[in-house]
Image (cartoon, rainbow, N blue to C red):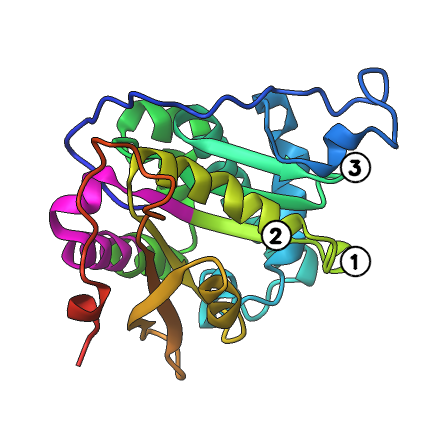
Amino acid sequence: MAKITKAVTIEETPKMSQVSSSSSAQSETSPQMYEPRILRRDEVDAAAASLADSFAKDDVAMYFVETDETKHWTPERKWQLHLRIMRCVVDAHCLEGYALTIGPDYDGIALWMPPGKTMDGWCTALRSGLAWLRATLPRESRIRFNNEFLPLLHHTKQETLGQNDNNSWYLVYIGIRENSRKKGYGRKLIEWGTKQADTQGRLCYLESSNDINPDIYKKYGFEMVKNIQLTRNALPVKMDVMVRNPDARDAAPTAVETVSIQNMISK
C-alpha cells in the first residue's frame, strides 16, 4: 500500500504462466496447483474470499470492521464489509502488481507489489473499486482507513527505505487458509517474490500484524526494523515492519546497494 510517485522501469519481470484454475484446464492432481501462479481478474472473487478467510481474526483487518459504529451490525454484514475490502485490494494487485495463488482451491494468496508500481493511482482505484470503497466506508472505518492506516503505511515505508522505496518489492498481503497450512504454500509464495528481488538486487519490505509471523519471516531473510501502531481503538493495534536485503549470491551485477538494516531499527 505504499504510495510511489516516481515510476521505475523494470528490466526483469517475473516469468510465471497464468494457469487456469478450472477443472477443464488442469486436473485436481496437477503439480501446477502446488506452485504459485498469477491470478486472472476473473478469479478475484474467489481469491478475495480465501484472503478474507485467512484474515478473519486478524487485528488489523478487523480494525476497519469492528468499531462502535458497527457494533450492532449482523455478523453477515460485517463479513461483507471485510470481504469487500479484500476484494478491492486483490483486484488492485491484479491490475498493478502480482496477485498469486497456490493450491487446488485458492488455498494460499499473496499480493506482491513490484518496484515502481502502486495501487494508489486514480485509474487503478476506480477500476478496482478502491475509490468507491474509500468514499463509502462507514464514517469511523473511513477515518481509520483513509486518515490513519494508509498514511501511516506510506510514511513508514518511505521513512524506512528512503531512496530504496521506489526500488523494493513489497509483500502487501499473504494468507493461507487454516486447513491448508503446513503444506509449504507460504514458503513458496514468499520465495516467489524474494527470488525476483534477489535476481534484481532489490530489498523486500512487509508489515506483519501477527505476533508469531516475524519469526517465520526471519527464516527467509527478513529482519525487524520497527513497530508501528493504529491507535483509534481502546487497545492499540501493533504491526511489525520488516526488511530483507537481497541475497548477494543471486544479485545481478548491476544490483542496487544493500542497506544497513541495523541503522533502520527504531531506538
Question: Which residue corresponds to the image point at 66% horizontal and 62% vertical from the top-left?
Answer: 74
In depth, the one of 73 and 160 nearer the eye is 160
In the image, taking residue 241 as reference, residue 79 lies left or right, namely right
Calculate the distance from the C-alpha at mark 2 to the C-alpha at mark 3: 14 Å
Which residue occupies the extreme left position in the image?
Answer: 163
Instruction: Give how far across and how far down residue 150 sits, in percent.
Output: 29, 53
Q: Is residue 260 above or below residue 25?
A: below
In the image, taking residue 228 as reference, residue 46 lies left or right, namely right
In depth, the one of 215 and 180 nearer the eye is 215
Instruction: Give the residue pinned by disc 1.
Output: 179
Helix, strand or loop at mark 1: helix
Which quadrant holds the C terminus?
bottom left
Instruction: Give the residue pinned by disc 2.
Output: 186
Q: Amino acid at mark 2?
A: Gly
In depth, the one of 267 and 175 nearer the eye is 267
Question: Which residue corresponds to the image point at 19% horizontal and 75% vertical from the top-left?
Answer: 266
